[in-house]
Amino acid sequence: MNTVTVSPKFQVVIPKAVREALVLVPGQRLQVLVIEGRIELVPVRRTEELRGSLAGLDTRIEREGDRV
C-alpha cells in the first residue's frame, strides 16, 4: 500500500509506482473528486486518447423518442 504525507503547503507526491501504472507525466492534469470522505485523482485525458475506447459497446438500447 502506498501512503503519502501532506506538506505544509497541502501538497502530496504521487508515488512512482502509481505514476508509472497510470502513465502520468509532468504537467498532466488530474481531476480531484471527493467521494464518501475520500479523495480520488482521475487523470484527464485528451479526446484523441479516448478514440476507440468504447469499441464493442452495445448501443441497441431503448431510447425515448426525443433522444434518437
Image (cartoon, helix red, strand yellow):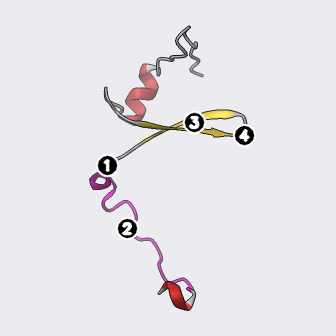
Q: Whole-Å distance between the Cαs marked 3 and 1? A: 19 Å
Which residue corresponds to the image point at 27% horizontal and 54% vertical from the top-left? 48
Q: Point out which mark residue 40 bears.
A: 3
Distance between the alpha carbons at the discs numbered 3 and 2: 26 Å
Q: Label 1, on which residue?
A: 46
The answer to whether mark 1 and mark 4 are in CB contact below 8 A is no
Residue identifier under label 4: 36
Mark 3 and mark 4 residues within 8 Å of each other at the beta carbon? no
Q: Is residue 43 above or below residue 59?
A: above
**Residue type, mark 2 in image:** Ala
Amino acid type shown at disc 1: Arg
**Earlier sequence position, callout 1 versus callout 4:** 4
Residue 56 to residue 36: above or below: below
In depth, the one of 8 and 20 nearer the eye is: 8
Which comes sooner in the sequence, label 3 or label 2?
3
Q: Which mark is residue 55?
A: 2
Q: Is residue 47 magenta?
A: yes
**Going from the N terminus, do you reach mark 1 or mark 2 first?**
1
**In this picture, which residue range is highlighted in magenta?**
46-63
User: Residue 47 location in percent, x, y?
Assistant: 31, 54
